[in-house]
Image (cartoon, rainbow, N blue to C red):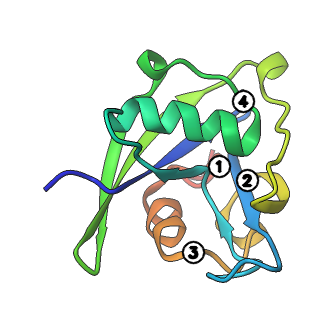
Amino acid sequence: MSPATVRIVLTDHDGRVLMLQRAADDDVLPGAWELPGGGIDPGETAREAAARELHEEAGVAVGADALAEWGVFERAGRRTAFFAAGCAAGDCRPALSHEHDDWRWARGPAEVQPLTPSAQWAVARHRWPGADGR
């Protein structure tokens, strides 16, 4: 089964993860924190959709070829393909779309609560800076 949606785990030079807060007036999970992402348009690969969504939602341009496969989240018969990328300091200045009210470079999941289900899955498997005691 092909994925229906995509998400991006974008890390900065310090290993923090870009998290977006859903708009307070959203019909689905208003105010919850999530990773950038969205639907796959007809004729688009999952990787292309991830690059497009990252640019549309956060204003961060990362080429599709720079996105690495990161995992697949499955819930209620829907699959979300996750991709990962890093960005240089100069490229990591998010500019939000109307879909989100806030953004944060998170050092851990405690900084961004509540989380959407796919974000819960992703932050549980992400290697956070300092999580191994270093």
**Residue 12 occupies which quadrant of the picture?**
top right
Q: What residue does disc 1 label? A: 130
Residue type at the position of mark 2: Arg
Callout 2 secondary element:
loop
Give 11 or 25, whichever is nearer the viewer: 25
**Labels 1 and 4: the sequence-earlier one:** 4
**Side (left or right) of 36 relative to 46:** right
Residue at 72% x, 30% y is 60
**Side (left or right) of 81 relative to 14:** left
Q: How dense is the environment of label 3, judged by Cα within 10 Å: few (below 14), some, or many (20 and up)?
A: some
Q: What residue does disc 4 label? A: 60
Say if residue 11 shows up in the picture: no
**Residue 11 occupies which quadrant of the picture?**
top right
**Side (left or right) of 14 relative to 6:** right
Q: What residue does disc 3 label? A: 116
**Labels 3 and 2: the sequence-earlier one:** 2
Residue 95 percent across, percent down from the top left: 85, 39
Q: How many marks?
A: 4
Q: Marks 1 and 2: which is nearer the front? A: 2
Q: How dense is the environment of label 2, judged by Cα within 10 Å: few (below 14), some, or many (20 and up)?
A: some
Q: Quadrant of the C terminus?
A: top right
Say if residue 2 shows up in the picture: yes
Alpha-carbon span between mark 1 and mark 3: 24 Å
Q: What residue does disc 2 label? A: 107
Callout 1 secondary element:
loop
Residue at 70% x, 45% y is 57
